[in-house]
Amino acid sequence: MRPKPLIFGVLFPTIMAIDIATKRWALEALAARSSELFGGLVPLTLAFNKGAAFGMRIGDDSRWFFIPVTIVALVLLAVLFRQAEERDYLRITSISLVVSGAVGNLWDRVRWDRGVVDFLGPVDLIFWDFPIFNVADMAITCGAVLLAVSFWLEEQAEAVTPGGAGTPGDATGAGSAPDEGESGGEGASEPVGPGRVGPEERAGGL
């Protein structure tokens, strides 16, 4: 099986299943009270986000802004996915992660007007409380970082490729005509001049 459908076929349903299952659990388990993970390091708090990832909002109800924006982004990602090389595992993986997370949050926005279900956080970073997020947000973030790395690596590879390279052999002079007077193989002519006898004259004098 080709890498593209294999990687996408594994990541997409896996992330979607985990995202849907954890959101459903959060709606049931965290509706009455919050909880925590890792000894309080990661609080579990049910929240409904009508904005973008990590609670970013545009106005009071930005649902109908983010739905078309997400659809356009998915179309662009589909184009990138199609253009990706079969062996470009980093780009294929990154796009698959972003698409999976985007579809997971898009489903929440389409199915109701309460917003996307978030439940991980807020995480106290001392200087800032990291916003509440979900599994889909993690997939989008990881995929976006990997996609940026993929573009950077591609740019570096193009930068080290010599520009304006000619046809093979130009650097070594292969394929160029031999200099005048250079000895060659079969068919090489001898210079004829004063004091020299050409092949025809020698043949006629025998």
Image (cartoon, grey):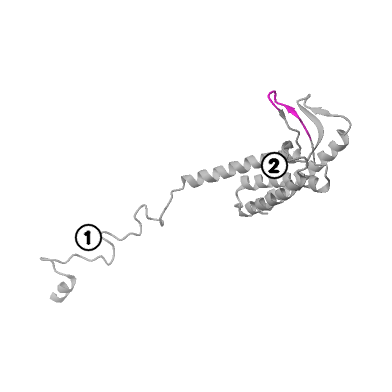
Question: Is 123 or 156 nearer to us in this picture?
Answer: 123
Q: Is residue 82 left or right of residue 154?
A: right
Q: Is residue 91 left or right of residue 204?
A: right
Q: The residue tagged with tag 2: helix, strand or loop?
A: helix
Question: Is 101 or 106 nearer to us in this picture?
Answer: 106
Q: Three-letter amino acid code at disc 1?
A: Gly
Q: Residue at x 74, y 28 (%)?
A: 123
Q: Write down the residue under mark 1.
A: 181
Q: Residue at x 84, y 29 (%)?
A: 34
Magenta region includes residue 197: no
Is residue 13 visible from the viewing direction of this image? Answer: no
Mark in the foreground, 1 or 2: 2
Q: Residue at x 15, y 72 (%)?
A: 202
> What is the magenta range?
119-128
Q: Exactly how many numbered labels are in the figure?
A: 2
Q: The residue tagged with tag 1: helix, strand or loop?
A: loop
Q: Write down the residue under mark 2.
A: 140
Quote the CA–CA distance across marks 1 and 2: 68 Å
